[in-house]
Image (cartoon, rainbow, N blue to C red):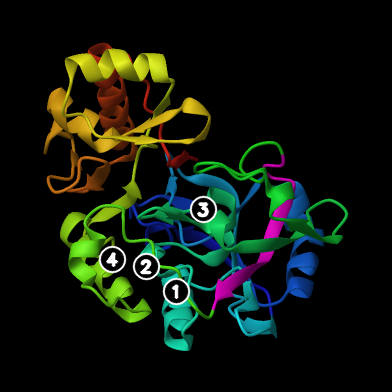
Amino acid sequence: MVNIKENISLKPYHTFHINVRANYFAEYDTVEELKSLLTLPLLKDNRYLHIGGGSNLLFTKDFEGVIIHSRMKEINLLSEDDKSVLINVQSGMVWDDFVSYCVSKGWGGVENMSHIPGEVGASAVQNVGAYGVEAKDVIHSVQVLDVKTFDEHTFTNAECHYSYRKSIFKEALKGLYIITSVTFRLQKEPVFRLDYGNLISQTGENPTLATVREAVINIRRLKLPDPEEIGSAGSFFINPIVDEESYKVLKTEYSQMPSYPLQGGKIKLSAAWLIDHAGWHGKSIGGASVYPKQCLVIVNNNNATAGDVTALAEAIRKSVYEKYRVDITPEVNYI
């Protein structure tokens, strides 16, 4: 049944763990309960926000309205053949639990995205990715609920308009639908992607899904803070993408700058490298700090306020632009 709480601290519900509050917090276990929840006067009379694991959010102040969260966590096998499986995963499933389940079944495609915080529903909004693989590479379709008509609808992968950390749900259709489940196509004979970072050196000559997952988790634990111990939202900034002409100018002056070619002549740069070489390694404003082991991460190091985090992020952004004439934008959503 729908569970509604009043005047609740959101500290446990977002990974920055900043102590802001919400007027109401509502959770549901089925799509029918979600429909019922959306018809309540409470939702009609108040602003509301649907969240996942809170791993990509920065609450800048108390939320005057209703926070909604899915507790739906079922995984259902829809079909399979000799080469692949089609599975449907409900929105509230913890992403890394889903990855672990796939690896245990011998289904390949998501192992490089091990240990990413958050939930499955949000993965289809954000197009999460790591080590050369993105959610769009394995998403078959996305099931949603129209928040006005309560109609259920399915978006194909193509209709989601996926690109780097973007989707139609994050832009053109933002706020119009709630994702209820995601359908994935996974491979029984996995094709490993080990050319990104130093994965290949960690997995040996005969990689398995389990060894790749273990390598990714080990690397991420060395580089990134555990949000249960140190509050953060993971990568705070999106890696910037520049045209080839701008890249050539930068590369002439900064020959050691890492880069990753994309389709259409675009070049992806490393935001972490830009931040580090702009002098922000380990620096702080108030209780917010640049994580010393990974400059792409801003952490709640000492009871940071949202103001500390936004001030640090803006100072970094301005500094990087002044030095490189490259604009880095937050991956984190300010609420």
Q: For mark 4, give the secondary structure.
A: helix
Q: Residue furthest front?
A: 205
Query: Magenta span: helix, strand or loop, mainly?
Result: strand
Mark before the other along the chain sequence, 2 or 3? 3
Q: Position of residue 256 (x, y in %)?
A: 16, 29
For label 1, the residue is 99
Q: Nearer the viewer, mark 3 or mark 1?
A: 1
Mark before the other along the chain sequence, 2 or 1? 1
For label 4, the residue is 216
For label 3, the residue is 22
Q: Position of residue 87 (x, y in %)?
A: 64, 77
Mark before the other along the chain sequence, 4 or 3? 3
Q: CA distance from mark 4 to mark 3?
A: 35 Å
Identity of the amino acid at label 3?
A: Ala
Asked if the residue under mark 3 is in contact with the one under mark 2, i.e. CB atoms within 8 Å, the reply is no
Q: Callout 1: few (<14), some (14-19), or many (20+) C-alpha neighbours within 10 Å?
A: many
Asked if the residue under mark 2 is in contact with the one under mark 4, i.e. CB atoms within 8 Å, the reply is yes
Q: Horizontally, is 3 left or right of 247 in the view? A: right
Identity of the amino acid at label 1?
A: Val
Q: Magenta part of the protein: which range?
A: 173-187
Residue drawn at the location 51% of the way across and 35% of the way down: 263
Quarter-wise, where is residue 290 in the image?
A: top left
